[in-house]
Image (cartoon, grey):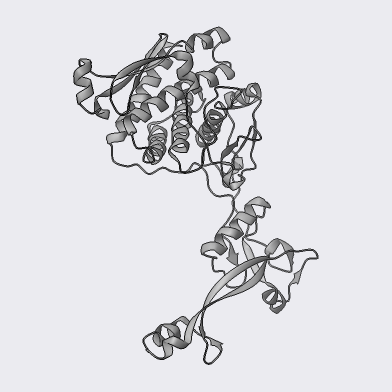
Amino acid sequence: MEQKTNEYRKAIADAFVKSLQENSLEWKKGWNSSVATPQNAITGKNYKGLNRFFLTLHSMSHNITDPRWATFKQIQDKGWRLNKGAKGRKVEYWTPYDYQNKKSLEWSEYNKLLKDSERRKQIGIVAKYYHVFNGQDISGIPELPEQPERVEAVSDQIIDTISRNMGVEIANEGGNQAYYSIQRDKIFLPPKTAFISDYEYNSTALHELSHATGAANRLNRDIKNRFGTERYAYEELVAEISSCYMGEHLQIQQTAEHIENHKAYVQSWIKKITEKPAVLMKAIRDAECSANYLEYQAELISEKEYQKTLSGTMEVEPDELAPKEAARERRADPRELRVSIVPKQSVVKLLNDKKEHVSVSAAEASAHGDRVRKAETLAK
């Protein structure tokens, strides 16, 4: 591994370790939603709650770009026509109801009657359901206002090279989601026009490619975990740090702002993990293995150079090594930890409980990991 890359990765690793002691940063998603918020075609009001969620999900899965929806009655009242074969989606509304007089109430009336001890027994909330149809299925509806043209993000050459050599297809069919499908061994990203910059597109692709390195036929990390678990969070750390490492190879320059956003993402997931310093150290080691693999697949290093990286890894150590007995008695402080890259056959593992050092083989270390990405939960 080149000295420049060595020094760069150490600086990045140190920054992630220090982030544990910093104020929380706000992660900024690198792309805009490709699906506009669903709204009623007549009133222009946005749908809320579950109605918004399900209409958005339906739009994403069926490539619907028109955010407008209307009931059959609203379509008739406007003199529009519903296209043959159009299918509606059910929406739900909760409305105040007067059981005594058998009529719906305005919310102001309902709140007033709640103060009446007798009348409040005769009112309640009932659910009403309607079917709404999308604007793409309605003839006669006005054309949507012309949207400003979006510029496509440019895929870096190393992304295409890694994708080809790993045999992992990257499809820009993910709607508003970016994820690696374990079952299909395929990456899904939002459309290139959704990304706010070339860097955001390529760093997101590198994040998902880092997840793909954990497949059984590659680095064999444990990547089949449920969203929200500590193991899922751990794999997110690995992928994001690996992506940050690989950022130095992109043609577009990696700025301090980019690094801050990587740190913010790591902070958001490290909160899910109990033993933060030790787990972050382990994630940094696995990210190192992932980045080495990606460099090889990107044809940035030869097979011989990659094989050499398998005998080296990251070592976690205190700034000043104390005697073993003293190390057992005090708790590890992340401010006292530093990361260095050490080319040797064993790694030093910081135990969560005893805080002592033990050696494990490099082969065992490279095979040991935890993971998962945005999951097959949204079909993703």
Along the viewing direction, whichever of 346 and 132 lies nearer the viewer: 346
Q: Is residue 158 left or right of residue 262?
A: right
Q: Is residue 162 left or right of residue 290?
A: right
Q: Is residue 351 left or right of residue 144?
A: left
Residue 320 visible in the current orientation: no
Q: Is residue 63 above or below residue 275?
A: below
Q: Position of residue 72 (x, y in %)?
A: 70, 73
Q: Position of residue 366 (x, y in %)?
A: 48, 19
**From this viewpoint, which residue is outermost toward the right?**
84
Residue 299 visible in the current orientation: yes
Q: Is residue 134 left or right of residue 286?
A: right
Q: Residue at x 32, y 30 (%)?
A: 277
Image quarter of the C terminus = top right
Q: Position of residue 37 (x, y in %)?
A: 56, 59
Tally of numbered discs: 0
Q: Is residue 32 above or below residue 205?
A: below
Along the viewing direction, whichever of 30 and 9 lies nearer the viewer: 9
Along the viewing direction, whichever of 243 and 355 lies nearer the viewer: 355
Q: Position of residue 91 (x, y in %)?
A: 61, 68
Q: Residue at x 41, y 31 (%)?
A: 255
